[in-house]
């Protein structure tokens, strides 16, 4: 039996911690991101028969490599199978380009996978505590819904979603304001930055933290980050099963914002998954694109685009990519090829793919598709991560392909029918603080 897996900080200025501590804390105390000390490769024979396993079975094998030393196998099996109550199928778009559809979960975006896994893992770690754990999350839209739905009904945990009044779409809002149970939506009279500031202030409030257990479900959390490797393995298995990989190299394109999704793919490749090349597709927020070209990393404020989940000016997981390749620009630029698209280009791709193939991308997936279109060479097969359902961006997509063409999936329609329940909050911290103290009683 190996020693229990430790997690170190990418800033390397604080002692290593256990999985439990990394999950409960989220961010390391030196502000670095946690990384597993070892990435265990699979025996090559695993990939010879992987097509005979289901997505859930594959995910369990991968999860054992990450968490097998820390969580008893039966429990881990339960967590993985419960998390993946939906599939991540691969769908053919052209002769050489496939879509890995990550939008079949409860909120129709890939963040469901990480959020659901984290909720179940946290619940497992906190099982013996009788005090309520409070998850605080500030959201500009999609993160709030994935986290709220991921934690819905999970015992011993209460989620407080802070969002800026009037600044998230009706569909997004319905996904976290109609849930009830252990989810409270807090409508803040301010901006997203105000929401984030309230949350950060609460985490730093020592007196409050002495009485009330607070934690974050930020996307940098290892329990949200690592499970994203699961579906890269599934993409390979399903393509192999379909017989399209014979004598072909696999290229994977990832629409990227904070680069958590792509970094999880890099980890999958380090575990032996045969991916020849990663392609990072960006919108006009192109700091990593520039880095790949020039070796200079210049984070800057984000700009708004129609692929808004990628509007990130300082991608947090860049620290993990640097760490994986010892800061070598050469290695990173070899592993990842960058592409960048303007809103105009994204609209053109959406329209063209839809009219030529009948496949409807969302604005993020469209970036991934086009990057493959430009990159792929003859002996290669490409798969892009379709990170959200197009109905989450109905206005943008219908403006391109025509009014009334995007069907609202049943799951989204259900949310819209629910009763909206919110508490109102001012931006001043005292009111939020009093509210949280009451939770500790
Ligand atoms: C969060 C998100 C992304 C970006 O993923 P990162 O892991 O932050 O790079 C892309 N598309 C959609 C729809 C998202 O919600």
Image (tube, rainbow, N blue to C red):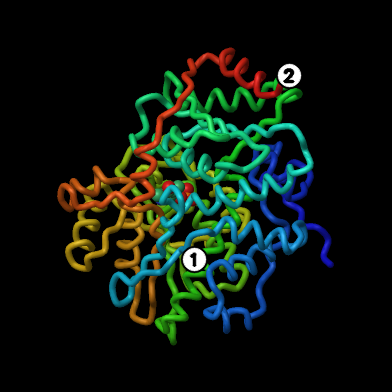
Q: Residue furthest left?
A: 402
Q: CA distance from mark 1 to mark 2?
A: 49 Å
Asked if one can make out residue 23 in the rendered structure from this viewpoint, the answer is: yes
Q: Is residue 400 above or below residue 69?
A: above
Numbered mark located on residue 214 in the image: none
Residue 439 in picture, x, y percent from top left:
65, 23
Quadrant (top left, top right, bottom left, bottom right) of the N terminus: bottom right
- Report helix, strand or loop for mark 2: helix
Circle 2 crowding by C-alpha within 10 Å: few under 14, some 14–19, many from 20: few
Residue 162 in picture, x, y percent from top left:
50, 28
Mark 1 highlights which residue? 334
Residue 108 in picture, x, y percent from top left:
41, 51
Instruction: Give the foreground label among 1 and 2.
Output: 2
Asked if one can make out residue 284 in the rendered structure from this viewpoint, the answer is: no
Q: Is residue 13 left or right of residue 175?
A: right
Q: Residue at x 38, y 58 (%)?
A: 386
Circle 1 crowding by C-alpha within 10 Å: few under 14, some 14–19, many from 20: few
Whether label 1 touches label 2, CB < 8 Å? no
Q: Is residue 254 above or below residue 270?
A: above
Q: Residue furthest bottom?
A: 247
Residue 387 in picture, x, y percent from top left:
41, 55
The first of marks 1 and 2 along the sequence is 2
Quadrant (top left, top right, bottom left, bottom right) of the C terminus: top right
Q: Residue at x 34, y 76 (%)?
A: 377
Who is closer to the viewer here, 396 or 434?
Answer: 434
- Report helix, strand or loop for mark 1: helix
Q: Residue at x 35, y 72 (%)?
A: 376
Q: Is residue 409 left or right of residue 226?
A: left
Numbered mark located on residue 207 in the image: 2
Q: Is residue 398 above or below residue 159?
A: below
């Amino acid at each position: 039996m190996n020693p229990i897996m430790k997690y170190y900080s990418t800033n390397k200025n604080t002692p290593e911690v256990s999985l439990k501590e990394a999950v409960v804390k989220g961010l390391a105390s030196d502000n670095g991101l946690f990384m597993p000390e070892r990435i265990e490769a699979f025996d090559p024979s695993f990939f010879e028969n992987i097509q005979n396993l289901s997505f859930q079975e594959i995910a369990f094998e991968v999860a054992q490599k990450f968490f097998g030393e820390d969580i008893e196998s039966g429990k881990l099996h339960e967590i993985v199978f419960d998390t993946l109550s939906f599939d991540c199928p691969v769908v053919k778009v052209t002769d050489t380009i496939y879509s890995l559809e990550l939008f079949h979960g409860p909120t129709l975006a890939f963040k469901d996978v990480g959020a659901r896994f984290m909720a179940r893992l946290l619940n497992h770690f906190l099982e013996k505590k009788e005090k309520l754990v409070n998850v605080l999350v500030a959201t500009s839209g999609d993160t709030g819904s994935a986290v709220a739905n991921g934690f819905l009904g999970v015992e011993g945990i209460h989620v407080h979603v802070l969002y800026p009044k009037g600044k998230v779409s009706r569909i997004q809002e319905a996904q976290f304001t109609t849930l009830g149970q252990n989810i409270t939506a807090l409508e803040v009279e301010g901006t997203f930055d105000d929401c984030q500031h309230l949350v950060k202030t609460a985490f730093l409030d020592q007196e409050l933290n002495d009485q009330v257990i607070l934690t974050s479900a930020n996307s940098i959390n290892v329990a949200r980050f690592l499970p994203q490797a699961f579906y890269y393995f599934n993409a390979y298995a399903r393509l192999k099963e379909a017989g399209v990989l014979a004598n072909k190299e696999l290229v994977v394109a990832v629409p990227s914002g904070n680069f958590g999704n792509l970094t999880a793919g890099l980890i999958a490749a380090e575990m032996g998954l045969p991916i020849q090349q990663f392609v990072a597709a960006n919108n006009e927020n192109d700091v990593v694109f520039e880095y790949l070209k020039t070796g200079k990393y210049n984070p800057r404020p984000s700009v708004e685009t129609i692929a808004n989940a990628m509007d990130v000016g300082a991608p947090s997981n860049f620290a993990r990519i640097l760490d994986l390749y010892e800061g070598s620009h050469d290695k990173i630029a070899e592993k990842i090829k960058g592409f960048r698209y303007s809103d105009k280009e994204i609209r053109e791709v959406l329209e063209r793919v839809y009219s030529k193939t009948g496949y409807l991308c969302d604005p993020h997936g469209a970036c991934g598709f086009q990057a493959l279109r430009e990159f792929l060479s003859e002996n290669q097969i490409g798969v892009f991560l379709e990170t959200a359902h197009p109905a989450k961006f109905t206005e943008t997509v219908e403006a391109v392909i025509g009014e009334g063409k995007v069907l609202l999936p049943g799951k989204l329609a259900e949310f819209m029918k629910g009763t909206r329940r919110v508490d109102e909050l001012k931006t001043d911290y005292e009111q939020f603080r009093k509210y949280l103290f009451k939770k500790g009683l």
